[in-house]
Amino acid sequence: MSRVSISKFTVKNMYGQLLLTIAGPSLTLFEKLVIKKASLLGGLIFFDTNYVNAEQFKALIEEIKTLRSKAGLAPLLLAVDYEGGMVKRFGKDAFTSLPSAKALGGLYKSSKQAALQLAHDVATVSAFELSRVGINLIFAPVMDLDTNPFYRESQRAYDEDASIVSDLTQVYLKTMQSSGFQAVGKHFPGFGLLKEDTHKQQGIIENIAKEEVQNNLLPFKLAIENHSLDALMLTHGVFSDVDRNSVPFSKKWIGGILRNDLKFDGLVFSDCIMMQAAINVYPELNERVAHCLLAGCDYVLATITPLMDPTALSRHDAHPLFRAYYESDLFKSSQQRISRYLTNDYLPPQKSKYEQAVKRITAFKWDRSTTNEY
């Protein structure tokens, strides 16, 4: 790859590495300017506030793509959290109601084959329905063990048993991978190791047993070994026996354990750096972004609404931490990984297979009181 100039952040051949949000169902003039001018922008993550109906949302996505293309900048990741159960973002007008991960984990214990089939169906339906409205990346599945109290309330994790979590997430990931749809497993090295909700506070674990860490790592480790995990998201947690730095800011976790020990060569996403757990570490936003990149993250999530001031984005090259990153091998390697990742194209299933998957999901009875949005 040719060397990328960092004198300006409108360099044509640079893949942006920051994922942001927009405020509402249509673009403001300010947001249009950011999309056209900021090559540091690598993608957008969407929420229910951006969705009115399928036609409106498709038009929004097309406008974003057109603005980016006409500016001559790299295409954006267009992402959503879409796990099923409580974590859903879009309306019922064009989307099937999906069971929670916990519901599939419960089914696995009574009928393993039925649960694996439904995991395949959830992935098939998610990819098909999201791609229809222009989404090209999904933050799912949850690969954590169901041992965090926050998860037990939200039903976002499949089970406490690592083998059950691994079996179900392997099917989900393989289904996504075979179709070319981009899925991001989360939250490495395992949110189940924590007791806190990192949206609100820092999770710190002291003197954790090595066996417990290995058990939580198992779904990720097996997925990496089976080449089914192309991208993952990190958790905001401090595991002091390994590193005093939070995982997204930790060279030891990302460069040492994930890259060197586990031989993971896919994309690494930080969890949202607007969570209190990240703010507590680096109160200044630029520092949070830079330290994630310097630790080895390929993408940094910052769910800021509205989009940041484009003049602030253009000043990043003056920051010494950013200069250090853009002059490093980390930057070059990350750009190469992103380039490979963005070349995949989604291949939708036959309509009959999609319809059969919808029928099986609809026929599955689960506690739908858990589908209130998180």
Image: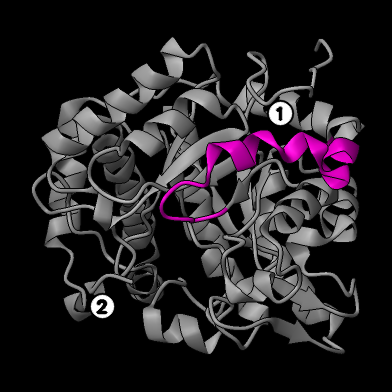
Q: At label 1, which amino acid type do we have? A: Arg
Secondary-structure class at tag 2: helix
Q: How far apart are marks 2 and 1 (CA)?
A: 37 Å
- At x 55%, y 37%, the residue is 310
| Contact (Cβ within 8 Å) of mark 2 with mark 1 | no
* Above or below 301: residue 180: above
Please say whether residue 133 is visible from this viewpoint: no
Q: Label 2, on which residue?
A: 370
Magenta residues (range)? 302-325
The residue nearer to you, when weighing 98 against 363, is 98
Q: Quadrant of residue 367?
A: bottom left
- At x 88%, y 44%, the residue is 320
* Above or below 198: residue 302: above
Tell me, yes or no, whether the highlighted magenta stretch contains residue 306. yes
Percent x, y for residue 3?
84, 14
Secondary-structure class at tag 1: helix
- Crowd band around label 2 with a 10 angstrom C-alpha radius: few (<14), some (14–19), many (20+): many
Q: Quadrant of the N terminus?
A: top right
Q: At label 2, which amino acid type do we have? A: Thr
Q: Quadrant of the C terminus?
A: bottom left
Percent x, y for residue 354?
21, 36
Please say whether residue 128 is visible from this viewpoint: yes
- Decide which of tag 2 and tag 1 comes sooner along the chain: 1
All told, the count of numbered labels is 2
Tell me, yes or no, whether the highlighted magenta stretch contains residue 353. no
Q: In this view, does 307 lie to the left or right of 4?
A: left
- At x 15%, y 30%, the residue is 352
Q: Label 1, on which residue?
A: 337
